[in-house]
Image (cartoon, grey):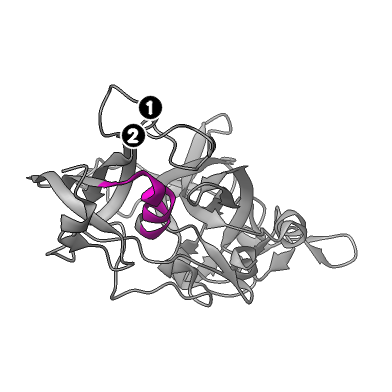
Amino acid sequence: MASNYNDFRLATDGGIRYALLAGPEIEADDKGAKSSEQYLIRGVDVGAFFAEAMPPPIAFLNFVLLPPRRRMPGTGIFVTKSVKFKPFTSELPGDPFGYDPSARDGSYNDFYVADISYETGQEDDDNPHDENKPETFLEHSITAGGEFLSLPATRTQVEDVDIDGTSSPGAYEANEDNGMPILKTVCTIEHNLKWKFCLRPNWDTILSALGHVNDRAHKVFFDGRKETVLFSGVSGSQVYMWGGARLVAQPWALDFKFSHKEMTDEGGVFGWNHAYSPKKGKWVRLWRNGGVPLYLKSNLALLFRT
């Protein structure tokens, strides 16, 4: 087979000819499905095959585009997850990038085996990435938590009833137990938004918005009302991606953290710029000296622009 490249009947969309050595093997469960294949390709096609199978992100205007990865022939649901290359035979090494052009004939394998792994759910044709809609390209995870609000006994009342109200319903009286520990849980939603491929993070915007709250509702935060979502932190690392023989992109993988506090109490909605007043017995808007809010506001959608 190795001496008959012209007999390779199959070819990728980019024109790289190959022979199918093994597969496809398919594994599926209730969480998804994956598959694998083995191709025989020429060593000189290794870089081009990888670039076609897993193209790196590219910058276009003010946005990062993620070119579609190669899909397994015959089905549109399996998308390339990873590719592993090795020389076709173990007797000879390979030189897929032409590092040793003066080598004698027969010094290197002319062919390589490409082990390709596919998975479902890597891309979605029905939901293309849109720079104006961060929810189309961010990976979103949430956890529910909360913080404790300590309330003084003053301005509270007590009623001597059990959970079913079968003792003395309606018999409210002032709470005279000043040492009573009263804790109220204020629930929050912690959002983690992962931006896997960001070529040029706008660090000025990101760092200046730390500690700010949203100045408007955003779909990515479940349309949380203004001043209810706090930008609480960011972490990331730069990834060096291989595009076939050379590094073609150095994107960042960023994790943004937000805390969403939207309290509904006594007919009103309160957020991060509110505090509970024990004296008034209700939530009030809080201002710092000079009329400055406790938390400044920003358009948090701008964090996801390059």
Residue 260 visible in the shown view:
no
Indicate the secondary structure of the residue bearing disc 2: loop
Q: Toward which corner of the image does residue 272 lie, by quadrant? A: bottom right
Residue 181 visible in the shown view:
yes
Q: Give above or below for 295 relative to 38.
A: below
Q: Nearer the viewer, residue 106 or 140?
A: 106
Question: Farthest residue in the front direction?
Answer: 104
How crowded pointer 1 is (Cα within 10 Å; few <14, some 14-19, many 20+) is rated as some
Q: Name the amino acid type tagged 1.
A: Pro
Q: Give above or below for 235 relative to 109.
A: below
The residue pinned by badge 1 equals 93
Of the two numbered discs 2 and 1 on the same chain, state the one appearing first in sequence: 1
- Residue 293 percent location from the top left of the image: 77, 63
Q: Is residue 284 left or right of residue 10?
A: right
- Residue 257 percent location from the top left of the image: 55, 49
Q: Toward which corner of the image does residue 90 lie, by quadrant? A: top left
The label number, if any, that marks residue 164 in the structure image: none
Q: Nearer the viewer, residue 1 or 138?
A: 1
Residue sitting at 17 percent across and 46 percent down? 37
Q: Nearer the viewer, residue 61 or 224?
A: 61
Question: Mainly helix, strand or loop, the magenta region?
Answer: helix
For the residues labelled 2 and 1, say whether their Cβ atoms are less than 8 Å apart: yes
Q: Nearer the viewer, residue 238 or 150?
A: 238
Q: Name the amino acid type tagged 2.
A: Asn
Q: Quadrant of the C terminus?
A: bottom right
Indicate the secondary structure of the residue bearing disc 1: loop
The residue pinned by badge 2 equals 109
- Residue 222 percent location from the top left of the image: 42, 67
Residue sitting at 35 percent across and 32 percent down? 106
Spatial separation of the CA atoms under disc 2 and disc 1: 6 Å
What span is colored magenta in the figure? 41-52
